[in-house]
Image (spheres, rainbow, N blue to C red):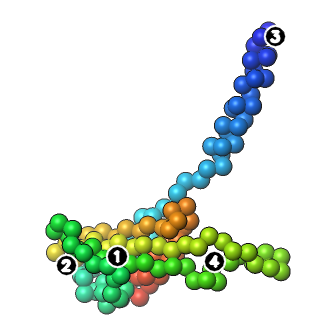
Amino acid sequence: MQLADLRFRETLPIFVAAGLILGCQSAPPVTEGYPHQLSLQEKTRAEVLACAGPPLQERQEGGATVLRYYREAPLLEESMVSSKTSRPTVHHGCWATVVLREERVEGVHYRFVPSSVDASNDCEAIFARCPE
């Protein structure tokens, strides 16, 4: 019985450490299923340009046209108020990619920068003027 008790005491810290490490990790933010992202489906290129403006980048990939937009968080959003002071938070933004086939939206993809921060509000703001 003493050998089993000794082995338990030796392995317990390993399991506790593994539990703490795994428990402190969080899942990446969700990048699909936002209202403006979904409402752009099947819209024409002209409709997207009218409400979102010109993209930072436009290129052809095979039979698709890819429009790339980027929006950074406002500076005030990047500081957190805490007890009479403020402290900086992570600088973040969002890349939105609109994929067009035959002049119609086939898909809209968001990529948060950094990927650990939910910057969906920044991506949704790109398309805020687009009717739902």
Q: N-terminal of the two: label 4 or label 1?
A: 1
Most foreground residue, 37 or 15:
15
The residue at which mark 1 appears reads as 68
* Amino acid marked by disc 3: Gln
Residue 41 visible in the displayed image: no
Horizontally, is 63 left or right of 83 in the view?
left
Identified at 79% across, 75% down, the residue is: 82
Q: Earlier in the sequence, mark 1 or mark 2?
A: 1
User: Are the residues at dot 4 and dot 1 in contact (C-beta closer than 8 Å)?
Assistant: no
Quadrant hosting residue 85? bottom right
Q: Amino acid at mark 4?
A: Glu
Residue at screen point 38% across, 78% down: 69
Q: What is the three-letter code of the residue carrying label 1? A: Arg
Distance in Å between CA atoms under marks 4 and 3? 56 Å
Q: Is residue 2 above or below residue 105?
A: above
Q: CA distance from mark 1 to mark 2?
A: 15 Å
The amino acid on which the numbered mark 2 sits, given as a three-letter code, is: Glu
Q: First in sequence: mark 3 or mark 1? A: 3
Which labelled disc corresponds to residue 2? 3
**Residue 78: assigned label:** 4
